[in-house]
Amino acid sequence: MNAKAFLFVFAVAFLPFLASAQGFAGLGQSSDGFALPDPDTRFSFPDDHGPHPNFRIEWWYVTANLRDKDGVDYGVQWTLFRNAMTPSGTDADQIWMGHAAVSGPDGHYFDERFSRGGSGTAGVSSEPFEAFIDEWVMTGSDPNNVRLHAQGSDFSYDLSLQASNEFVPQGANGFSAKSHEGLASHYYSQPFYKISGTVILPSGEISVTGRGWLDREWSSQPLSPTQTGWDWISLHLDGGDKMMGYRLRDETGPAYTVGTWISRDGTPTPFVPGELTMTPIEWASVADRDVPVGWRVTLPKRDLAIQVEAIYPQSWMSTAVPYWEGPVSFDGTHKGIGYLEMTGYE
Amino acid sequence: MTAAALHALLSHWRRKPFQLVTLVLGLALATALWAGVQAINAEARKSYDDAANVLGGSQVIVDSAGAQIAPDAYATLRRNGWKVSPIVDGWVAGSEGRVRLLGIDPLTLSPGTPTRGALEDIELTDFLGSQGRILTSPATATRLENFGARVQKVEGLAPGLALVDLSGAAALLEQSGYDRLELDPEQPLSQTPLKEIAPSLIIKAPDSAGDLARLTDSFHLNLTAFGLLSFAVGLFIVNGAVGLAFEQRRPVFRTLRALGVPARNLVFLLVVELLILALIAGAIGVVLGYFIAAFLLPDVAATLRGLYGATIDGALTLSPLWWLSGLAIAILGTALAALTHLVQVARLKPLAAAQPRAWALASESVMRMQLIVATLCLATSLFAGLVGGGLVGGFVLLAGLLLTAALALPTALSIILRGAERLSRGVLSEWFWADTRQQLPGLSLALMALLLALAANIGVGTMVGSFRLTFTGWLDQRLASELYVTAESEAEVTDLIAFLEPRTDAILPIWHTDAEVLGAPAEIYGIVDHPTYRENWPLLSALPNVWDRIAIGEGALINEQLGRREDIAPGDVIAMPGGWETEVLGVYSDYGNPMGQVILPTSTLTTRYSDIDRTDFGLRVSRGNVDAVRTSLTEDFGLPAENIIDQASIKSFSIDVFDRTFAVSAALNVLTLAVAGFAILTSLLTIAAMRLPQLAPIWALGIPRHILARAELIRALILAAVTFVLAVPVGLLLAWVLLAVINVEAFGWRLPMHFFPADWAWLALLSLLAAGLASLWPARRLATRPPADLIRVFSHER
């Protein structure tokens, strides 16, 4: 899901008061002076859980599919973005942004925070692990054993996340190519979290359990200027396997669709571009625009043909950079739940 | 049946389109002036709120002991669920004086704040950082030229204010802490109590955001009063037009009633008709009002900037509420104007005579009633003015006096006309006076409107004229130095003085600092002992040897505003900021300054206060030397030309500001007079149509039509002239109230009254012209009326 690079580059160009649309024109040129992803780099933990300030953009991204005792679905998102204004690597040149959301039957609740580097109000340390912005935290001995908390004026959650599997490198040993032109990022995931905790909504406090997924990614290269947005899915298959896929839409040609199959023991198998197909089949009017909330996803190599449906189609993030992010369920040759993210539906 | 009745009623307007136009136009004009003034007021208030919000309209967290807040404490708050945004607040030296510097954090500032709005078109990366952009209004940008390209102009920022990134402010002000934390109105669900994490910090209510609003209240009250006056005048038109329409349709009403339409239905239909007309006229009026507001707004903006330093947006943003309130006021006005007529229709007897009742009979009892109401108005206004006091009391006094004068007008005119009748010789002239008096009831509303408009004109004109005369005289006194210079920096001051010493007669420092005196923003100035002050300074009252005592630091001078506001007179002791006291030795006039001011000897100023702007100087130079000194300052010393200003320039600038200030009053004056002229026209037309039965006998007696027409014209002129003469004392009374009550309450200074007879002559001419023009048409119609029409009057006589 390297395509989230978009989101962050966007965010900086569109920081809260920068309402004027600047298009994508500026995105292709700003890696000057920053470190570039290298295919020979291998992850080294716990250091790589921490920030990489010589890269321009980076994020710690958790999504969770939760259920209460009555079987009602909830989706939770916790995201911390780092963006460097210059390649200096200094704290003062970093801008941090946090997004948190809860999707439930009563609605989609979210909040957004910003912080300047060096102010002590946001940051990440690798050991013991802590990622925070304001009072929002993802903290524990290491990312496989964390407390996750965020709140807004109308929601709050406090969750405990546990995983025993190794972190899963995406792409070629963690080097995740973005397009045919070779743009790339460093990318690993933890798709095996088991979660329990509480969610507080206007209707009251709810005990929940479920599954979660962490994405860690850093890069300096924004996407191609002609790419207009992306659609990303992370799926927990009922058998215990996981799948991640995304489709980068390009205004000048066909979409670039790749992903990874992660078997239940954690072994990743990346797809070659085009192997996976993602086709919108159902649209909903969300926040005054049409957004595809139903998808047909096929992966012939694994005999996979499923319909992915948003559980709460109105899961719109009206943040500085608006996008859709919410829980999904799927049916067909395979069944399960997961998360969907869609950007560029301005 | 209802449809047929409605059709019958509406057919009247088809036959008398001019009446329809009069009604709609009158109502539209009344609504327009009212709505326009409201739009301007709303716009200005919004701008004040914006400005106030930039400087802290939301709740803030401050240190209880007044210390700066450490960045660590800020981080602790954020990490415990407090959505707060740090603010650094200080003053930065610009090339032309100090500018308030506000260091903000755009990343945490609440999205709703106007400050964020000011950043809308700014690149974040350009703004952030210790070397980031400095944002100011275009006017303030000229004072910060020493920052070169860092300064970026942003329309709509409060004047005298510079916005910069937190780190930029920290660097410029050399401080690491924050002055306050702005509390986001939206806080998360749970947060650790403040006293547990930062015991020294407290939440403070927003700063009294109303400073500007308070200062400018008087101005807006003024505008509102004008709008109300125009509306009242407009209502006279509506009343006339509605009255006429009802009178002329009496036969129709009677017929409808005779045909079986119940009175209730008839009244209902008329109400529906009026409602429709009011809505149409109201809509037109609101649109017109928008244009009036858009037209006047630049002047209002200039006024507010000049008088109070308040910036308001140049563009109008109108809420749906404003549109609705415009329509509501139109409906209300129509209801007010039509109420008596509707009651009459409800009481109409189906079998009453079909002939139009001559326009409300001249009845002594009506006038007596008006006189009683006038007396009540007078009593109320005097009570409000004398006992109530305050600005609102002043305006009630004003309104009451005007109303009293208007209500007493018919009686006064009647007495005068009766006197003229007694003095007149000859049948025709006797008829003329009697007939004029007989018409008074029909014309009295229009004449009242004229009286109001004229009195308002004379009153406001006298006030503005007196103010201007006093102001220019005061400027001559106050601006005694020939040249005023501002050093580019404090470091340059010593060199500048050394340079000027041999070239000038005296160098007078004009150092000052801003502070709160007795709970309100004020300026504290320091002066040196010099004959310039002894000879010129405009003292209103003082203790003996005031200048000698000031020179040795025995006390202070205060301006009239501060003296009146705090009720301080020479001899009293004033508490100064910084916790010390001094005796007030004198009070001086200080027109055009909304703030209180204190003058101390320079030595006292510098020992008591640290944050002083020391870059301004007044120079005494012999007349012939001014240009030479100026040239050598720019060419030899290298002071930028804009840092030097001569006496004449300041004076012309000040007077220019003054004139623009009252441009709005002038424009509204003209509009009010125009509405009054229109009211006369409609009244005369109304009467003309009904006067035929009265004129026909005279014509039948052998008086030619053109003589009758001339008599009509002369009558209008005489009535206008008498009304004008009566308006003069009313106007002067109005002026006195404005100068001695309203001005003192609103601005804190009292002005002497001057008279401007030449202006009155113009006004007299104008009102005669208006009345003449208004009567010309009906008179002409009479002169060319076919004799058959006049004869028909007798055949219709039943």
Image: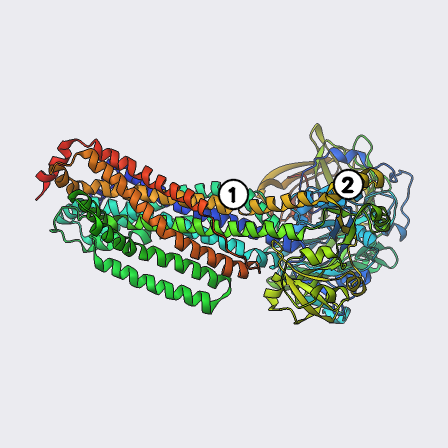
Left or right of B178 on screen, residue B441: left
Q: Amino acid at mark 2?
A: Arg
Chain under label 2?
B
Question: The residue tagged with tag 1: helix, strand or loop?
Answer: helix
Q: CA distance from mark 1 to mark 2?
A: 39 Å
**Up-down relation of residue B193 to residue B358 (above or below):** below
Which residue: 37% across, 66% down?
A: B379
Q: Are marks 1 and 2 on the same chain?
A: yes
Q: Position of residue A150 (x, y in %)?
A: 72, 58
**Corner quadrant of residue A72:** bottom right
Pick the residue in front: B225 or B208: B225
Q: Which mark is residue B272?
A: none
Which residue: 73% across, 39% down?
A: A246
Question: The residue tagged with tag 2: helix, strand or loop?
Answer: helix
Question: Which residue is label 2 attached to?
Answer: B630
Between marks 1 and 2 in the image, the one whose residue lies nearer the viewer: 2
Left or right of A217 on screen, residue B417: left
Left or right of B272 on screen, residue B31: right
Question: Which residue is label 1 attached to?
Answer: B296
Lower position in the chain sequence, tag 1 or tag 2? 1
The C terminus of chain B sits in image quarter: top left
Q: Amino acid at mark 1?
A: Leu
Pick the residue in front: A77 or B50: B50
Left or right of B36 on screen, residue B20: left
Q: Residues within 10 Å of mark 2 (few under 14, many from 20)?
A: many
